[in-house]
Amino acid sequence: MAGHSKWKQIKHYKAATDAKRGAHFTKLIREITMAAKLGGGDPAGNPRLRTAIDTAKSASMPKENIERAVKKGTGDLEGVTYVEVTYEGYGPGGVAILIFALTDNPTRTVADVRHKLSRLGGNLGSTNSVSYLFERKGQLYIEAAKYDEDRILEATLDAGAEDFKAEGEQYIVTTDPAAMHAVKAALETAGFEIAEAEITSIPRTTVHIEGKNAESLLKLLEELEELDDVQKVAANFDMDVAQLSGA
């Protein structure tokens, strides 16, 4: 798909040196809780919850933590009430940024987001200022070293995927959001291990950045995702990943 963001690939590249498991678990627990709150506690009838639980399992989250998060979402256990908020803005080089948060205090969260953006060369935009530049898609990530590209390409097309591409150390399979779990199940049945699956925002077009703008943008995206309330960040940029050595 034209316009695929590099951010997922870059995070995959950096993962070995950025192990922040505790913070990652906290974000996963919030997503499980919100998914259960909105769609019920049965993963079979709640695709968002199924995705969140699968992600938590792939991150080796203990089963009891997952079950507790579901019960907090359904109201069987007391817990903090979170709301979903999406912020839109721009980063260095005119890159459009979507910031998805789950928060118990939107006033605090928007202040934190605005501070990061303004400090690192960006600015907060108004509602719908950049969201039209993205579309929602399902994406599956598969370790490229494990499988022959031609073989997995054929399997993804047979499974009903919309797009397939090799990018860095990963194969990326793109699907309609509603079809993601069916495609994932078909690939697993065919013998392929899915490293990660998510519903995400894919940029329709990208802005190419390099040099100082690239360095500043990567720092901004990383610091935004480090905020406790921020679950995910999407940006419409393209760059040479070789620049990572200097970012």
Image (tube, rainbow, N blue to C red):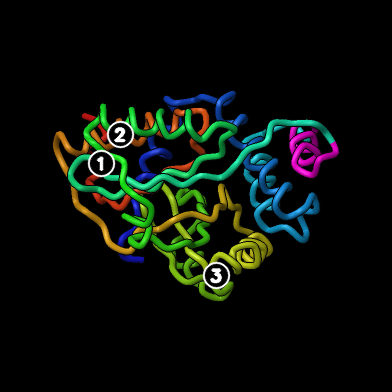
Q: Quadrant of the N terminus?
A: bottom left
Q: Is residue 22 magenta?
A: no
- Residue 127 marker: none
Q: Amino acid at mark 1?
A: Gly
Q: Amino acid at mark 2?
A: Leu
Q: What residue do we see at 53% from left, 69% from top?
A: 176
Q: Position of residue 19 (x, y in %)?
A: 49, 25
Looking at the image, is mark 2 or mark 3 earlier in the sequence?
A: 2
Q: Which residue is mark 1?
A: 91
Q: Is residue 239 above or below residue 186?
A: above
Instruction: Give yes or no for contact between labels 2 and 1 (Cβ–Cβ under 8 Å).
Output: yes
Image: magenta residue range: 64-76
Q: Secondary structure at mark 1?
A: loop
Q: What residue do we see at 34% from left, 49% from top?
A: 126
Q: Secondary structure at mark 2?
A: helix
Mark 2–mark 1 Cα distance, whole angstroms, equals: 7 Å
- Residue 117 marker: 2
Mark 3–mark 1 Cα distance, whole angstroms, equals: 38 Å
Res. 6 visible in picture:
no
Q: Position of residue 46 (x, y in %)?
A: 72, 57
Q: What residue do we see at 34% from left, 52% from top?
A: 5
Q: Is residue 217 above or below residue 167?
A: above
For residue 156, side relative to residue 54 (left or right): left
Q: What residue do we see at 63% from left, 38% from top?
A: 82
Q: Amino acid at mark 3?
A: Ala
- Residue count near mark 2 (Cα–Cα under 10 Å), binned few <14, some 14–19, many ≥20: many
Q: Which residue is mark 3?
A: 155
Q: Position of residue 22 (x, y in %)?
A: 59, 23
